[in-house]
Amino acid sequence: MTSCGPLRKQALFSGVGELEVQGQYLYVTDQYNYRVRRVDLVTGAVSTVLGSGSSIGWNTNTNALLATCGRFAGLGASADGLYLYVAMQNSNMVGVVRNVGTPRASFNYVCGLNPQDPQATTQQVHVSYPKTT
């Protein structure tokens, strides 16, 4: 998790998109920086929880800060705050960040069509999701 510090004015966003509140955190899609940011509503600290800052390539099933993401179409958090779900605009995929805001945070796609797979058809869908209680 990278941090922009305790001052909200230090965070630079480019194309604020979707918003999701979960507890004391506000999650914001930073469209043109290809990242999802987390704002601590108590301290004002802003940190990155998803995205390397690049939309080039296909890097998933990895550390959340190394993932390459395109633009975002939606955002949602699990009730316990451990999972953050993101809908990708250009790839028609839904991904999940597990262990949000921790050094163990990871990212992978949970459903949708992989646009990088030349053998993929619109009938092929991969589904894998964490169980919540």
Image (cartoon, helix red, strand yellow):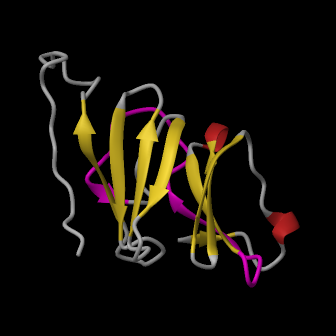
Give percent across and percent down for residue 86.
43, 48
As for residue 44 lying within the magenta part, the answer is yes
Give percent across and percent down for residue 120.
15, 19
Name which quarter of the figure residue 126 lies in.
top left
Rendered residue at 44%/74% (across/down): 81
**Residue 86 vs residue 67, the one in the foreground:** 86
Rendered residue at 48%/74% (across/down): 101
Give percent across and percent down for residue 70.
49, 35
Name which quarter of the figure residue 92 lies in.
top left
Looking at the picture, does residue 127 appear above or below residue 90? below
- In the image, taking residue 73 as reference, residue 18 lies left or right, namely right
Rendered residue at 57%/77% (across/down): 23
- In the image, taking residue 119 as reference, residue 60 lies left or right, namely right
> Is any atom of residue 116 visible in this view?
yes
Q: Which secondary structure class fits the magenta region best?
A: loop
- In the image, the segment drawn in magenta is 41-63
Give percent across and percent down for residue 4.
72, 69
> Is any atom of residue 68 visible in this view?
no
As for residue 15 lying within the magenta part, the answer is no
Looking at the picture, does residue 121 appear above or below residue 132? above
Looking at the picture, does residue 60 appear above or below residue 116? below
How many tags in the picture?
0
Name which quarter of the figure residue 38 lies in.
bottom right
**Quarter occupied by the C terminus:** bottom left
Rendered residue at 78%/61% (across/down): 11
Farthest residue toward the bottom? Answer: 43
**Residue 133 vs residue 74, the one in the foreground:** 133
- In the image, taking residue 66 as reference, residue 29 lies left or right, namely right
- In the image, taking residue 107 as reference, residue 120 lies left or right, namely left
Farthest residue toward the right? Answer: 9
